[in-house]
Image: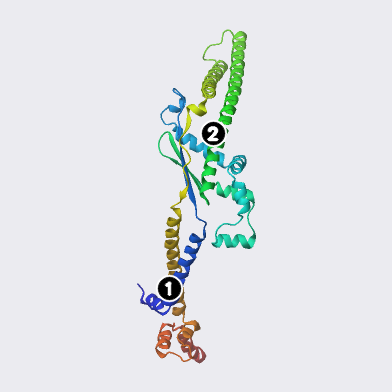
């Protein structure tokens, strides 16, 4: 390591220590300033009907399908608003516009609180609502809130609204499957009609005829689409008629009483480590910058070599002079030579 860097660090070690201490304190303030969170958990069991196409190799597991549907519903405004009303989340965010005493809360006090919709979206966002797949059929849902009662109420409302919307989506999927079957049936009928008309007009046509080949392929594709749509319709019909909400989705672990989340300690530890790292990076950059200033021989180095009462420290002054470049002296030595010429 360059000894000049060590010399710079020794001269300003108190300032660098202060920078690290301030960075750690700011990180701790951010972590401790957040409101305490309480977590409530529940587990869902999901399964597909026997013989379903979803059981094929490579397809998503039932738990993965439920996780995808649950996550997508959480991004919709209607779903979040319904959950907020059922769990009294709307009342909570309305009576507590600003939570905590950290820097984000300070900024909100200066700028003003966010809208109720934004606070509801944050309370039901990915940082507060988490889903974990614990097996092919088990999906665990964790909800964090600022009070134990609110956490449990939010989880109950989420499960109830999800099961309701799941039934609605099943019925919508059934209606969509029916429309797809009708469309595929019309397409197959049109393809067969065109093929029959062409054969009637061209009785000598063979399989090598290009037009004949195109019409045959169209009919074959229409038959495949109809078979696929019919199979999907049968699956959706079976799921709805058999009461799929009770048969394929069941709450095996109801919402548990909320407990203090352990994420606060981890967040504090990460914040302190992160603050220390940022402080060290700033000190490193400061050492590089001050060393370059010293090497450039600017008046700032002379100023640091002066004591508090204005008396110049001779040793520091000599070190500053030695560190200064010799370009000005060489330039002055060249001037007389230019004049003689």
User: 10 Å neighbourhood of mark 1: few (<14), some, or many (≥20)?
Assistant: some
Contact (CB < 8 A) between labels 1 and 2?
no
> Residue 81: x percent and y percent?
62, 42
List x then y, in percent, for residue 104. Answer: 56, 60
- Residue 268 appears in which quarter of the rendering? bottom left
* Residue located beneath label 2 in the image: 163
At x 43% / y 73%, what residue is drawn? 17
Residue 305 in the image: above or below residue 109? below
**Which corner quadrant holds the N terminus?**
bottom left
Image location of residue 22, percent across then percent down: 47, 69
Whether 154 is drawn above or below 333: the answer is above
Say above or below: 17 vs 190: below
Residue 17 is marked as 1
Mark 2 neighbour density, 10 Å: few (under 14) some (14–19) many (20 or more) = some
Which of the labelled discs sits on residue 303, or is there none? Answer: none
Quick check: 191 left or right of 264? Answer: right
């Amino acid at each position: 390591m360059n000894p000049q860097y060590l010399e710079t660090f020794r001269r300003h070690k108190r300032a660098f220590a202060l920078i690290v201490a301030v960075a750690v304190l700011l990180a701790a303030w951010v972590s401790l300033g957040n409101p305490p969170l309480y977590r409530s958990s529940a587990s869902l069991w999901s399964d597909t009907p026997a013989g379903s196409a979803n059981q094929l190799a490579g397809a998503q597991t039932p738990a993965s399908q439920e996780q995808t549907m649950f996550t997508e519903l959480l991004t919709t405004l209607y779903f979040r608003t319904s959950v907020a009303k059922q769990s009294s989340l709307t009342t909570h965010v309305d009576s507590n516009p600003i939570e905590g005493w950290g820097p984000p809360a300070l900024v909100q006090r200066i700028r003003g609180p966010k809208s109720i919709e934004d606070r509801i979206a944050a309370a039901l966002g990915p940082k507060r609502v988490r889903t974990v797949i614990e097996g092919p059929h088990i999906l665990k849902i964790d909800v964090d809130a600022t009070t134990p009662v609110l956490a449990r109420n939010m989880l109950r409302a989420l499960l109830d609204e999800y099961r309701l919307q799941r039934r609605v989506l099943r019925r919508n999927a059934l209606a969509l499957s029916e429309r797809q079957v009708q469309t595929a049936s019309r397409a197959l009928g049109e393809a067969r009609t065109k093929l029959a008309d062409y054969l009637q007009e061209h009785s000598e046509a063979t399989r090598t005829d290009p037009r004949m080949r195109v019409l045959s392929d169209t009919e074959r594709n229409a038959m495949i689409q109809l078979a696929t749509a019919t199979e999907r319709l049968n699956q959706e019909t079976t799921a709805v008629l058999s009461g799929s909400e009770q048969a394929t989705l069941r709450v095996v672990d109801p919402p548990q009483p909320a407990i203090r989340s352990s994420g606060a300690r981890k967040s504090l530890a990460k914040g302190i480590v992160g603050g220390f790292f940022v402080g060290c990076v700033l000190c490193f950059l400061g050492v590089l910058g001050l060393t370059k200033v010293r090497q450039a021989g600017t008046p700032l180095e002379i100023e640091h070599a002066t004591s508090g009462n204005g008396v110049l420290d001779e040793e520091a002054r000599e070190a500053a002079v030695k560190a200064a470049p010799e370009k000005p002296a060489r330039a002055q030595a060249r001037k007389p030579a230019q004049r003689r010429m």
